[in-house]
Each structure stands twice: as structure tokens, then as C-alpha cells.
Amino acid sequence: MKKIAVLGSTGSIGTQTLDVVDKEGDLRVTALTAHSNVELIEKQIRKYRPDIAAMDLPDKAAELRLRVADTDTKVLSGPEGVTECAACADAEMVVTAIVGIAGLDATLAAINAGKDIALANKETLVTAGDIVMPLAGERGVNILPVDSEHSAIFQSIADQKKFLKRIIITASGGPFFGMKREELAKKTRFDALKHPNWTMGAKITIDSATLVNKGLEIIEAKHLFGLDVDHITPVVHRESIIHSMVEFTDGSVIGQLGVPDMRLPIAFALTWPLRKVPVTEPLDLVKIGKLTFYDIDGEAFPAVEMAKKAARTGGTMPAVLNGANEEAVAAFLRDGCGFLEITELIQRAMERHRPVENPSVADIKAADAEARELVREALN
Ligand code: NDP
Ligand code: MG
């Protein structure tokens, strides 16, 4: 039995991870964490019987403690409780499925404790990849990407990293593919939450509509695979069947295909280096018929270029891009800003920021806070 801790177990990736656990049969869950969803985590505790669990919100932790008092699961409280679950659980692997920079401390704690990481929380690498990757190397920790594109890139590279020339990262294009800025200006959160191919948490669904998600993923790929962002080419692939590709020095291009179902990359990360039971429906290419590819419209969707720029600047700039985006998306989700304002606010935060080189975690958090404050002020 491989023991795993699932951080963010009540979310889209968290619940799909537990579905993979049910299918695989030889994984044991030793820790679960959530933010506020006590009803769901209670059900999960009763089913998986973890040793420990944590709620990020202290009053929710108190409520959960009462609800599961009849079980053997110890309930911890607050961000420190979540971090303790990441480090102390009797787990070999930690699935980081918390959304946003809120997942950074727990990911660092898990790596420091020598746990392998199944990484869904891309914001951790975007903001602190220069700290996370060397630390993982020092601690001998494997980082297995859960993001479907990065799982595809990892699988396509296999053991030929030294021949890697370029990454071709695919993007669905989101719900607003083909639209111009005038049309985008009118889009509401209801429109943006309708993703054509994937059902995901609200934040990443909005990121997919703005294409900020692809920008974040380019920075994530830079850290995971050690290529600069100018060797990572995004291409819109509407069907989300080819999850990404790599080009080698001889011109060969290798990609990974599969149905658009996150349980595939989750199972890959959990069972690597083995492959076990089927976790999705088989891929039927004849039924799909054709696969299509397009360039990204940089005028309508400036986020990809903004992310590349942040990555080239480096230091605290990617944390500013990420922090401004998290704050603007939260505002958009409560009708507090318009769709196009999201990328405009990121732009403004990046223009105002004086980046710190070789930042510490404290510098990164300060840059994140500065960007959030700037967005809040702009929206007031
Ligand atoms: P969800 O919003 O569905 O789930 C987020 C999880 O994190 C929930 O368990 C939530 O608890 C918990 N959480 C939220 N805020 C905090 C906090 N401040 N501290 C601790 N825990 C918190 O997100 P997703 O599952 O969609 O995404 C998770 C991560 O995976 C993101 O980084 C995303 O970019 C990445 N990802 C997601 C994909 C997907 O298909 N969903 C695909 C590829 C990557 P509660 O439910 O109690 O609020
Ligand atoms: Mg992805």
C-alpha cells in the first residue's frame, strides 16, 4: 500500500484523486485537508479513515472536530494545521490540490519532509519555482506533474531530456475562442464558467477563459523541465486530445494523447513509474474525427505574452502576475470587475512592481500582497 496525503481533497482535483484511489485499490489515504467544506470532508474522513485532517478556517476545524469525534482521525486547524498534514502525515506522496499561492507553504513543508509531490497547485511553481525545484533536488524528492499538459510533456520526454529542443503546449482556447475584445468586454462570470472540455474549480476555469492559465502553465513548464519560455510554444488545440508535445533536436515531435479527463494525469502521478488499471473511458479517435490547431490571438488574449514577460524578468515578477490575477479573478467571480479588467489589472500591477532578484519566500509573499493591494485599490 502506497500512502498518500491529499491537500485540497474537497476540490475538483482532490475529489478526482480520491476517485483514482478507489479505482487503483493499493493506495491508502493518511491525511486530508480542506478550507471550509466540512460536509464533504466529513464524508471523506468516514470513507478513507485518514490519521489526520485539517481545515484551513479555524471555526470550520472546530466544527469538523465535533462532527468526527467518533472516529480516530485527529483534526488540526488553520494554515499551520494544513502544513502539518503535508509534513507529518505518514505519507510517501503528497497531492497538492489546494488552489492558489495558499498552497505554497504546505508544498514547501512536504518537500522539506522528503515526500514526493503530485503537483496540481501550479501557483506554487509560478511564484516560487526557483526555490521549490532546487529544494526538491536537495531533498531527493520527485515532483510528478498533475497538470495534464505537464504530465504529457513529462511522459513525452521520457529519458531523452538531453535531446529536448522545444515544448509545444496545447490550449483548449477556452469558452471565448475566436472572439475579439469588443465581445469579450461583455462576458460575465456565468459565460466564463462554461468551459468547453473540462469541469474544474472556479478559479482555474476563469484562468482558462482569459488564457492566464496557459501563461501560468508556461512558467510552470519552465521550472519543471528547465527550458526558457522562448522554447515553449503554445498552440490552441480545440479538442483537448493531444495534451502537449515535445520536439527533439532531430525534429521528431512526440505527444501524449488521451480523453480530456484529469483522472489520467492524476493516476499517472500516483502510480509512476508504473501504469496500472484503466481510470477513464478509452480514446476513440474515429469518433472524434479530426484534431484542429490554431495560433493564440495575442490581441484578444494578452495573458500568455504577459506571463512570458514576467518569466523573462524573473525574481518576484511572476508572483505579482499571479497575485494580481488571484485577486482580480476573486473580484470577477463576485461581479466586482469586468472580464477584460482581469488582464488589465495584472498589466498595471506588473508595470508598478520593482522586482526583487533571487527572492526569499518572504519577498515572494510581500510581492503577492503588494499586487493584491494594488488590485483592491484599483477596484475601489
Ligand atoms: P478547487 O477550487 O476545486 O479546490 C480547491 C481545494 O483547495 C479545495 O479543497 C478547497 O477547500 C481548498 N482550499 C481553497 N482555498 C484554500 C486555502 N486558502 N487554504 C487551504 N485550502 C484551500 O480547485 P481545483 O481542484 O480546480 O484546483 C486545484 C489546483 O489544481 C489549482 O492550483 C489548479 O490550478 C490546479 N489544476 C486544476 C485542474 C482541474 O481540472 N481542476 C487541472 C490542472 C491543474 P474547500 O472545498 O473547503 O473550499
Ligand atoms: Mg492544464
Image: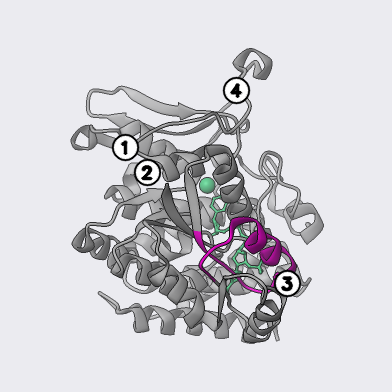
Residue 16 belongs to magenta span: no
> Disc number at residue 232?
2
Q: What x and y, as percent, mark residue 353?
A: 42, 79
Is residue 56 or residue 25 the one in the foreground?
25
Q: How far apart are marks 4 and 1 (CA)?
A: 29 Å
Q: Does the residue at mark 1 contact the one at mark 3 (Cβ under 8 Å)? A: no
- Eye-nearest disc, 4 or 1: 4
> Disc number at residue 282?
4
Disc 2 residue type?
Ile
Disc 1 residue type?
Arg
Q: Earlier in the sequence, mark 2 or mark 4?
A: 2
Q: Mark 1 points at which residue?
A: 166
Q: Mark 3 points at which residue?
A: 337
Q: Does the residue at mark 1 contact the one at mark 2 (Cβ under 8 Å)? A: yes
Residue at mark 4: C-beta within 8 A of ligand 1: no
Q: Which of marks 4 and 1 is nearer the N terminus?
A: 1
Q: What stretch is highlighted in magenta?
A: 30-52
Residue at mark 1: C-beta within 8 A of ligand 2: no
Residue 36 belongs to magenta span: yes
Q: Earlier in the sequence, mark 4 or mark 3?
A: 4
